[in-house]
Image (cartoon, grey):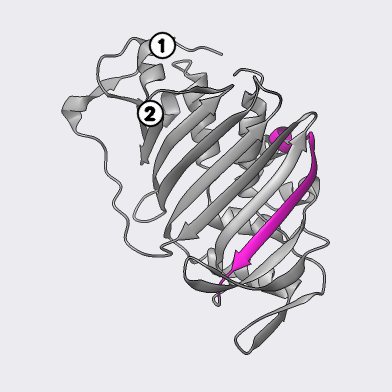
Amino acid sequence: MRRLAPVVALGAAALVAVAGCGAQSTGSLGNVKLAAADAVQQSAQKAEEVTSYSADVVLDASGGEKESGKIQGSMLYQSKPQLATDIRLDTITFGGQNVPGGARAILTGDTVYVKSELINRFAGTTKPWTKVSLSELDAKGQSEIRKFMDQAQQFDLAGTVKLLTASKDVKAVGIETVGGVDTTHYSGTFPVAEAAQLIDPAKREKLQEQLSQAKNVKFDLWADAQNLPRKVTLSGAEKEATFNLTALFKGFNEPVEITAPPADQVGDMPEHRGGN
């Protein structure tokens, strides 16, 4: 499991870098025809306006019989009136072994609530949920939760689509239906170093670190008539390990309900456990 972790992180970070643009191939949706580069540029602009959405994600990683794994789950996201996310990982498998009960994390404001049988066993907590302030994660030595939340906060639609503009070889493939919605399918690759320069400097180093060994990072993007991404697939490699990730986005700007768990089910995270 420990050796597979970088591959899983690679796939999670890859969700940020979902696609790219740059070539002059054209795609059409209805009567609208746009150069692939222009279409993805418009997607980046539209994504800036999105304040809430939901996503379904599947990540398959391989690195030998004992180092293969799968993560499958979903998330809710909102940026207003305050940043909040609800991430459910229903399936977590490493080396043929399942993580019992999966995992769930809710971020509201600056507080993280985590529900995980493994974390409960490791930390010695008795409540179903444990909580910790984001500002206290490092102080309390909760490195694994810090890594998890760092990756979770990369599920930012606007930041993701901004990375797409770094691609040099995007092309339109055709018109396809995703979740009952007509979309234009784009395909290409993106250079990690150049894409990293387009995002928040606070996230840049982490992205470069997680994707520094990635080879042949390929993407497919399905964008709807409003140029919003409806589906993304990514594939890449780190040395002898590979990952394949699929993300389905929906519910743009629709109301989402993200609430903290009941107080009587929440315990505090013990200090100085799971250190660096």
Q: Nearer the viewer, residue 47 or 216?
A: 216
Q: Residue furthest bottom?
A: 31
Percent of width and height locating residue 172: 74, 71
Q: Predominant secondary structure in magenta?
A: strand
Q: Nearer the viewer, residue 12 or 266?
A: 12
Residue 233 visible in the shown view: yes
Instruction: Report which residue position mark 1 lands on.
Output: 122
Q: Residue furthest left?
A: 264
Q: Which residues are magenta?
A: 209-224
Name the residue located 21 percent from the left edge and 26 percent from the top edge: 265
Q: Amino acid at mark 2?
A: Ser
Q: Quadrant of residue 112?
A: top left
Q: Quadrant of residue 6?
A: top right
Image side of residue 91 versus residue 220, left or right: left
Placement of the N terminus among the 4 image quadrants:
top right
Q: Nearer the viewer, residue 191 or 183?
A: 183
Task: Indicate the secondary structure of the residue bearing disc 2.
Answer: strand
Residue 110 visible in the shown view: no
Residue 133: image tag = 2
